[in-house]
Image (cartoon, grey):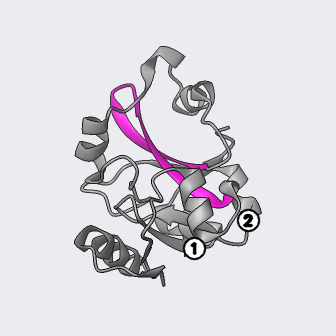
Amino acid sequence: MQPTNHPTALRVQAAGQDMGLDIIVVEFEESTRTAEDAAAAVGCKVGQIVKSLVFNVASDPVICLVSGSNRLDDRKLAGWAGVGRKKVKRASADEVRAATGYAIGGVAPFGYRQPLPVLCDADLLQYAIIWAAAGTPKAVFQITPQALVEATEATVLALA
């Protein structure tokens, strides 16, 4: 683990600092692309990894911050949006990049090209520290769940 020098990861770090967060992005030689990979790299439980997922809800992108040990229930997302389940679709790789500016496997929970609604899986709040991707498949940062929710103005709900 070492401090990052990757331009995209540094952009995430700067975005966090602009939001008042005291984060330091670190890079690993090994991949942190999946929740399991990230947990192994940082030495934490898989549940402490934040999966920043992008779903299109009635064609609009929504960011879902989900615990690494959970799978998002699209019925709950549809219920939050007040739409039918058929109106909820996981975004494609191109749609993710267009909405967030990041590639799948490195989507950060903030620092997007445009403001997007953010939902946070309530299960993340059980941990003192969580780890989130920082724009690349090898860069992450640690943060408290409360700080992440406040900074992103996330709506907390059961998403699993």
Q: Compared to 143, does 2 lie above or below? A: below
Identify the residue under disc 1. 143
Residue type beneath disc 2: Tyr
Residue positioned 69% across, 42% down in the render: 158
Q: Is residue 65 magenta?
A: yes
> Residue drawn at (48%, 59%), measured in percent from left and top?
32
Of callouts 1 and 2, the N-terminal one: 2
Label 2: how many residues lie within 10 Å, few (<14), some (14-19) or many (20+)? few
Q: Residue 71: image x %, image y %?
A: 63, 37
- Is the magenta region chiefly helix, strand or loop? strand
Residue in view at x 41 percent, y 59 percent: 108
Type of the residue with mark 1: Ile
Camera-side residue of 45 and 80: 45
Q: Is residue 85 above or below residue 41?
A: above
| Residue at (62% x, 50% y) in the render | 68
Q: Are marks 1 and 2 in contact (CB under 8 Å)?
A: no
The region drawn magenta spans 48-67
Secondary structure at numbered mark 1: strand
> What residue did someone put label 2 on?
127
Residue 45 sits above or below residue 67 on the image: below
Can you see residue 148? yes
